[in-house]
């Protein structure tokens, strides 16, 4: 039987009504069973993932893409643990806030409600299949998951775990749709189904996000590239700063919260940059250096204007020496992608000024950019990191997948 995305979206809209009426205990039990099914089916998931990895290598996927694609028992266990953590969070649906009595005597408040049907369009990240499904279900939504062809076998294997749990609890299976057809035409049609789908969240390369943003008839939460900065201030603890650089750049390069640009105050450049050069050299990092910093590095390339806006997703970094705190701020404001920025400083007032003035989705003082992640920030998992400021900004958990409606309580009140 051929797959129809229009029909799947219509069925998801009907299923969303069912999911919206599940209580917290029902949703949490469902999520717990999804987590258990993941662990129980680890061998079949890994077998499917091996097919995707083999095809990816044959098709020339780069190391960063293969890293995002790869699953192992520890990663599957981590995905399952994230689902358990989501289940353990408070239920955002139905919570009421801002109750106030108006001069007319009516009581006005706001109640959190599900968004409805959410479509995820993503590349090479099988964990997104589970993270997105779990977060959408927690928030009372149905979800349509359109992954890339490079992860199709993995995604379908993960989908079986979700189907098993939905069937056990007699929940409409259309509540979670994993699209089995990766043809571009299916994605193009999906983006026109504004009568069935309430929100699209694309997650992947900059090209994918721009294509969806420019072609969708449905509202889009944007997650553009992660050009994350570390600014090492003149008052930084240099050993701490070096550890922030090492962790942010070298721990896992193919993710959006890895560092792409290092800014160093000129007063400590002569002390800090040799340390940075030695560490980055140990990790075979390609350096794009400004004129003031290039002499500290072997085989560095002269930085171009494009390097300040580059998301390398590789063992590669741009480095610039700045005159002072203000120039560091100016550079970030000009070249930030709105993802994550970090300052290393022992001066409390500068740390607070940095946090106040930089308006990226996540702003840190003396902590690694690698903490810019839903799980690390207390969300259990994330459905994406919004770099647009409308509705949600930063890592998006279950709460970001709801909206608010006004509720009014009266006792026969009429307007005069």
Image (cartoon, rainbow, N blue to C red):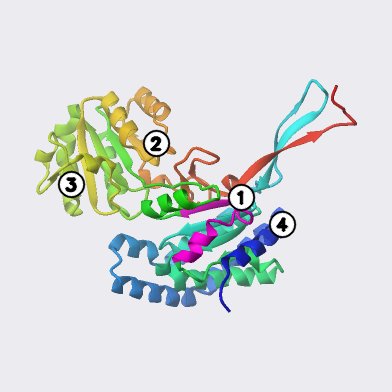
22 relative to 266, above or below: below
Of marks 1 and 4, which one's residue comes earlier in the chain? 4
User: Horizontal and vertical percent for residue 175?
Assistant: 64, 63
Please tell me whether mark 3 sits on a helix, a strand or a loop: strand
389 relative to 53, above or below: above
Tell me the CA gap for discs 1 and 2: 24 Å
- Which mark, by number, is residue 364? 2
Can residue 113 be seen by looking at this rendering? yes
Of marks 4 and 2, which one's residue comes earlier in the chain? 4
- Which mark, by number, is residue 89? 1
Q: Is residue 187 magenta?
A: yes
Q: Nearer the viewer, residue 229 or 42?
A: 229
Of marks 4 and 3, which one's residue comes earlier in the chain? 4
**174 horizontally vs 370: left or right:** right
Range of residues picked out in magenta? 184-202
Q: Residue furthest bottom?
A: 1
Q: Is residue 188 magenta?
A: yes
Tell me the CA gap for discs 2 and 3: 24 Å
Of marks 2 and 3, which one's residue comes earlier in the chain? 3
Name the residue beneath numbered marker 3: 287
**309 horizontally vs 396: left or right:** left
């Amino acid at each position: 039987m051929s797959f129809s995305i229009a029909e799947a979206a219509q069925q998801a809209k009907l299923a969303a009504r069912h999911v919206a009426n599940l209580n917290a205990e029902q949703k949490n039990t469902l999520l717990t069973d999804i987590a258990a099914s993941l662990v129980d089916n680890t061998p079949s998931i890994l077998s499917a993932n091996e097919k995707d990895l083999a095809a990816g290598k044959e098709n020339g996927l780069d190391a960063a893409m293969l890293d995002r694609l790869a699953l192992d028992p520890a990663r599957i266990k981590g995905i399952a643990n994230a689902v358990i953590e989501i289940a353990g969070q408070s239920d955002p649906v139905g919570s009421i806030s801002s109750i106030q009595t108006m001069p007319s005597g009516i009581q006005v408040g706001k109640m959190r409600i599900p968004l409805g049907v959410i479509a995820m369009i993503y590349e090479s990240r099988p964990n997104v299949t589970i993270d997105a499904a779990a977060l959408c279900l927690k928030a009372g939504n149905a979800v349509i998951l359109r992954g890339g062809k490079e992860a199709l076998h993995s995604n379908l294997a993960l989908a079986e775990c979700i189907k098993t749990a939905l069937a056990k609890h007699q929940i409409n299976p259309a509540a979670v749709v994993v699209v089995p057809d990766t043809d571009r035409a299916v994605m193009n049609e999906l983006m026109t189904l504004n009568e069935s789908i309430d929100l699209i969240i694309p997650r992947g390369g900059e090209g994918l996000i721009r294509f969806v943003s420019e072609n969708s008839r449905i509202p889009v939460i944007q997650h553009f590239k992660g050009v994350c900065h570390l600014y090492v201030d003149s008052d930084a603890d240099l050993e701490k700063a070096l550890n922030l650089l090492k962790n942010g750049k070298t721990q896992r390069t193919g993710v959006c919260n890895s560092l792409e640009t290092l800014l160093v105050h000129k007063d400590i450049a002569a002390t800090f940059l040799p340390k940075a050069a030695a560490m980055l050299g140990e990790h075979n990092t390609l350096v794009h250096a400004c004129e003031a910093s290039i002499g500290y590095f072997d085989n560095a390339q002269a930085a171009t204007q494009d390097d300040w806006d580059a998301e390398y997703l590789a063992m590669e970094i741009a480095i610039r020496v700045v005159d002072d705190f203000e120039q560091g701020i100016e550079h970030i404001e000009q070249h930030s992608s709105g993802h994550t920025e970090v300052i290393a400083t022992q001066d409390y007032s500068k740390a607070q000024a940095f946090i106040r003035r930089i308006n990226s989705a996540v702003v840190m003082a003396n902590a690694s950019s690698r903490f810019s992640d839903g799980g690390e920030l207390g969300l259990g998992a994330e459905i994406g990191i919004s770099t647009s400021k409308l509705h949600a900004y930063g890592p998006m958990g279950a709460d970001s997948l709801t909206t608010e409606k006004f509720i009014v309580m009266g006792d026969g009140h009429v307007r005069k």
